[in-house]
Image (cartoon, rainbow, N blue to C red):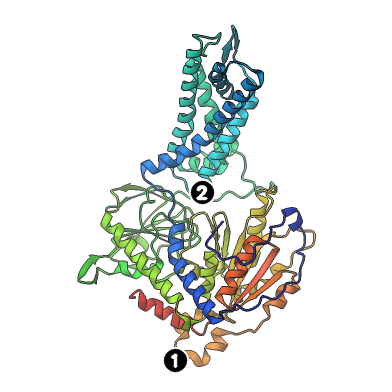
Amino acid sequence: MNKNTSPQSRSTPRPRSQARGRTVRTERTPRAPHPSGSRQSSGSAQRVARKAGSKAKARRTPAPLTKAGRIRRMLITAAVPNVVIVLIIMAIALGSLMLTGSPMAWWYTIVAEAWMVFNLAPVSAADVHISFLPALPALILAVVVAVRVRSAVKHKVSVKDLLTLLACVLGVPVVFTIIAWLMLWDAGKVYDVSPPNLAQALLRVIVLHLAAMAAGMGSRLWRALAKRYGVPPPLVDATLPDHTSGDGVREPAPAFVDHGEVAVDLSKNTLVITGDEAWEVEGLQDVPTIAEPSAPGPYHPVHPAAAHIFRKAQVSANDYVVNTKVEQVIVVGHPTLHRGVLALMNDPDIELVVLSRTKDFTNQRGDEARLGTTVKVTGEPSREWMKICEGATDMAGQAVRETLEDEELGFTGLHVAAAVGDTLSVNDTLVLGASNPVRDASMVGLPFDGVDTYSPRGAAGIDGTIAQAIGISLATQSLDPTNWRAPRVMALMGDVTFLHDANSLLIPEDQARPENLTIVVANDNGGGIFETLEQGADALRESFEPAFGTPHGVDVGKLAEAYEADYREVTTLQELLDTLAELKEYSTGITVVEAKTTRATRRALNEKLTAKVGQ
């Protein structure tokens, strides 16, 4: 649980069996205004502003990539199930000896024999040799190991991670088996027992734990490895089970295209830019990365508001000059959100490498760019370059924090995005609407590692965003129907996006409904994104509202009520924080949270942020 939220009401979550079916609407007692009035709103703005930088940075820092860190993490993953089994064996053996009054000297012999049984190794006692043992103990151990492997590989994993995990999954039980064999060998000098053939015992241990590792990796990871190493698709389809969703319906396999390998020298000042449909490219994990919210969380994030710095040859401050010009940009997927980032990709003085796994490339430079799907890397980023990127990110993050703390700007969509980000936890799922929400989410620190994020890009625009959120919620909760509470799905979108797809809230009575979906609507009564573009300039204000602002005045609460969705209205940042904290603890199916924001200060907000980052 995210302990940094400020829940004012902690209701006991209801079991999922009670949540199924149509949402039951209940009357809520209106909350009294906070005694501190506007000062509370100011304090919450500062609190969220601080977290927009520091908390996002903490979330985006995964486990260390060093060899020692990787071994430590994977060793813990592999050791836990084996240690647990050994402790259980020791406890049962000790209890049995105490109940029967048998000599305690038998204890370590029983523990060693039991370990052999759990690993299908042959046992021998009193001239009785058992080569084939009941499979249930070994099956229990294999299932526990497979579950641990699945937890280690379900998110961010590389080939190096897999090799390290394999070594640990095999190494730990092999060491334990050798220790058990030595214990039996020593006991054979006193009791009528003898150790099994060591080679045969180790072979069975390795086969058992290899099978557990293979099962824990899952078909998706095996398909990815098969694709990476060129295994023929017909062989893969015949060997691995189909991709299925929670209800058993087959999912279409992605049509990946291999465009070959590109050689890159990472000793050059390099930035990776990742967008929609990006993936984790082996060899680029240590490179500073500007990532859009729907891309994987990078190890070394660079804030998009700092992109312009990397087009300058030098930046000076306090009589200190640093060379900030990026020499090489590697694009993964399809980034589209930020003009400053796209300018980096379009700079003819910067080498451009574009990677894609589909037939389409986000390539604005034609033949000047090198295209591929994988990379062959040489060199590594310099320590100086890493510090420059980290410093630029810290500067941009501080600029966002200071802008959010400016009380004159009021309650804007950027504040809403910061509050949503503040209440996200690992294993939550986030859906971001097009236009301002996805860009605001990027400004406040997304993507977060451990939070699956979806956003319609390209020609999709604002079409079907609510439908997408409902579909993702249904798919997420169907993955484990036995879970007592559905996983949390949050959707952040603007008012125009919400109104455009409001009919998707109409779900037939005989169809499944989301059990834990919160839709946050940042309602600035029109097209807020146009306030920040050229058409929002002072010279065009006379015709701006009818052409671009398009105020609608729709009562979102009545619309939500018409579709029998729960509804909350908030007008301040503190109210939004309290409401999201409450919904985090108690879900009521579909809840629409309308955050009534202003767009009157949106252009001024962007200008202040731009001035702070020196653009």
Name the one closer to the observer, 453 or 85. Answer: 85
Q: CA distance from mark 1 to mark 2?
A: 49 Å
- Residue under numbered circle 1: 539
Q: Tag 1, which secondary structure?
A: helix
Q: Position of residue 586 (x, y in %)?
A: 67, 61
Q: Amino acid at mark 1?
A: Ala
Q: Is residue 74 above or below residue 270?
A: above
The answer to the question of whether label 1 and label 2 lie on touching residues, with beta carbons closer than 8 A, is: no
Q: How many marks?
A: 2
Instruction: Determine which of the numbered discs, if any, sits on residue 40 in the image.
Output: none
Q: Secondary structure at mark 2?
A: loop
Name the residue tied to disc 2: 155
Q: Earlier in the sequence, mark 1 or mark 2?
A: 2
For the point 69% across and 72% down, the residue is 567
Of residues 3 and 196, which is closer to you in this image?
A: 3
Callout 2 amino acid: His
